[in-house]
Image (cartoon, coloured by chain):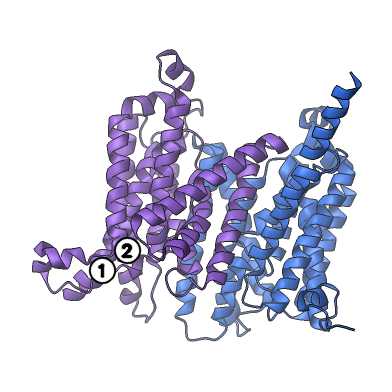
Chain colours: A purple, B blue
Amino acid sequence: MISFLQIDLPALLVGTLAALVCALIGNFLVLTRQSMLGDAMGHVVLPGIVIAFVLAGTTATWVMLAGAFAAALFSALLVEFLRRATRIEASAALGYVFTAMFALGVLLLEQSGVARTTFDVHHILYGNVETAIWPAATGFSSLFDATALASLPPQLGRLVFGLAVVALIVVLLFKELRIVSFDPDFARTVGIPPQLIGAVVVSLAALAAVVSLSAVGVILLVAMMVCPPATARMLTDDLKTQVWLSLLFALASGVLGYAAAVLLPLAFGYEISLGAAGTIAVIAGLFQLFAMLFGPKRGLPKTV
Amino acid sequence: MAELHPLLKVLLLQAGYNTIVVMLGAAALGAATGIVGVFALLRRRALVADAVAHATLPGVALGFIAAVALGFSGRNLSFLLAGAALTAVLATLSIQWIANRTRLTEDTAIASVLATFFALGIVLLTVIQTLKTGGQAGLDIYLLGATAGMLREEAILLALFSLLAAAIVALLFKELTLISFDADYARAHGFPVRLLDLAILGLVLVVIVIGLRIVGLVLIVALLITPPAAARFWTDHTGRMTIVSAAIGAFSAYFGAAISAIRPDTPTGAVIVLVAFALLLVSVFFGAARGIVVRAIGARRLRGAS
């Protein structure tokens, strides 16, 4: 039981919270044809996080956030500059900026010696849900013990903060987000600026990316921004229902995926371990596959 | 004579036969991606290529498992690349099925296929890492690329496939150019546009798979799309653009391979991509056809004349 509290509970919480925050904002990315934004975000913030860490020498939340936002902003400006200068479609401009930024991040990691001590490039790629541990837990009483709770892994606090901010803004701006996602022209006629709302969505996606990246890695973040919302979209036309369903699928993927990572090898009697970030994302993909095959709303006309 | 700087020595092909073969193999690969990339970029396949590249990971892992199960070395390049090609094709078909048969848009299809396939690859890699067999450490290099430990035969194999890809583009050059600029016109004149698009996708697949060893699957898409983007600043003529793009791709890969010859622990793919991106920035400013500087001078001349 104690090992559950020390090892499984924090990892389960980290995986599930990251799934929830990414899925929530992912709904609006999927509707506005920006599904690859999560992928781009996950790549471009890496050099920002590394530089911020090297400069400040700490992984405090605000340092990570500042570095990541600086990198995201720099990349956005670079994409815009290249898109105008090269007159090549935006997705290609995005493509060469995010690969170059990620390459820079990888080299900085290797050269600065940060690798192996604080983050590892393989953790960023594969995910590292399992590194969230809570050694201070001694029993269920620890759940109510302030000193033990204070030593919960820091990425948990970042994820809770990110989820709270994203949820709050989505609730407050739900009407605007719905109108802009489905009909930006109509939004303009009723006095809602689509660009401003679009910028809010991108900023929230950046926040979700930053709090998840160092906790679970790029791939879980990309999977969660797309798969649960896409799954939900195969089941309903109503946005509110879609958002709730996507959160449900994110939660289910987090719990089932983590359980699969821990229990599947045991069930087959092998001495192996599965990466939980991978299993969570695969479960989310399987949900989407079933929804695409059998969902009631899977094949309606693409004009939304 | 003073001792040459180690990097210069490697760049000038004075670093031993094996290194030379590997560097020339890398250059051939860079040229092939530069050539194929021109059409991938013009036909808007950049993001599909990225998804397909990431989708090779489960294939590499399955290739490793199959090789070990059949009693070969897990690092047998043929098994790994065959596996990679298999899941890359599967991913391409999945993207097309999702985009055509469900109401999800293409970007969502691309992102979800990329994430799910890559995640499956991660799960398989973690399985492999706990298997009681040697060589699994070697699989890491397929993520970010490496030239360290590369065999001469491997480099020659990559170079041959690169030449093959370049030869196919040369044969179909007129048709590919036509569908890239005016698909409707090509269709009206009876060109098999779907088939040619499929050919482009097939070539993208080939260069991605052969690029895995040196550039890695995370960044290979950059070597496809960055050189042609840079080449556009030097010429408006598609033929010349393809040649410039090939040269930029070849130089980037050659340079990256040289760096990793003197610093084997540096991920080769990251260096290659940064070199290509630096060349893109240089081209944006100083390119002879559309560079910012050239255009500014042109605009001043125009004002001076009036």
Crowding at dot 2, Cα within 10 Å, few <14 / some 14-19 / many 20+, comes out as many
Image coords of residue A185 (percent x, y): 48, 18
Using the image, name the chain to which the residue with label 2 belongs: A
| Picture quadrant where residue A14 is located | bottom left
Taking A258 as reference, is B278 above or below it? above
Using the image, name the chain to which the residue with label 1 belongs: A
Would residue A81 appear left or right of A148 to someone viewing this image? Answer: right
Q: Nearer the viewer, residue A298 or A144?
A: A144
Label 2 sits on residue: A258
Taking B295 as reference, is B36 above or below it? below
Q: Farthest residue in the top direction?
A: A189
Element type at marker 1?
helix
Image coords of residue A54 (percent x, y): 47, 65
Q: Residue, x 66% and y 69% (percent of image)?
A: B268
Q: Quick check: do tags 1 and 2 share a chain? A: yes
Q: Nearer the viewer, residue A213 or B305?
A: B305
Taking B286 as reference, is B183 above or below it? above
Element type at marker 2?
helix
Label 1 sits on residue: A8
Are the residues at dot 1 and dot 2 in contact (C-beta closer than 8 Å)? yes
Taking A168 as reference, is B246 above or below it? below
Residue B104 visible at all: yes
Would residue B100 appear left or right of A137 to someone viewing this image? Answer: right
Task: Give amino acid for label 1.
Answer: Asp
Q: CA distance from mark 1 to mark 2?
A: 9 Å
Q: Residue, x 57% and y 37% (percent of image)?
A: B100
Image coords of residue B164 (percent x, y): 84, 61
Task: Give amino acid for label 2.
Answer: Tyr
Figure quadrant of the N terminus of chain A: bottom left
Image coords of residue A174 (percent x, y): 32, 29
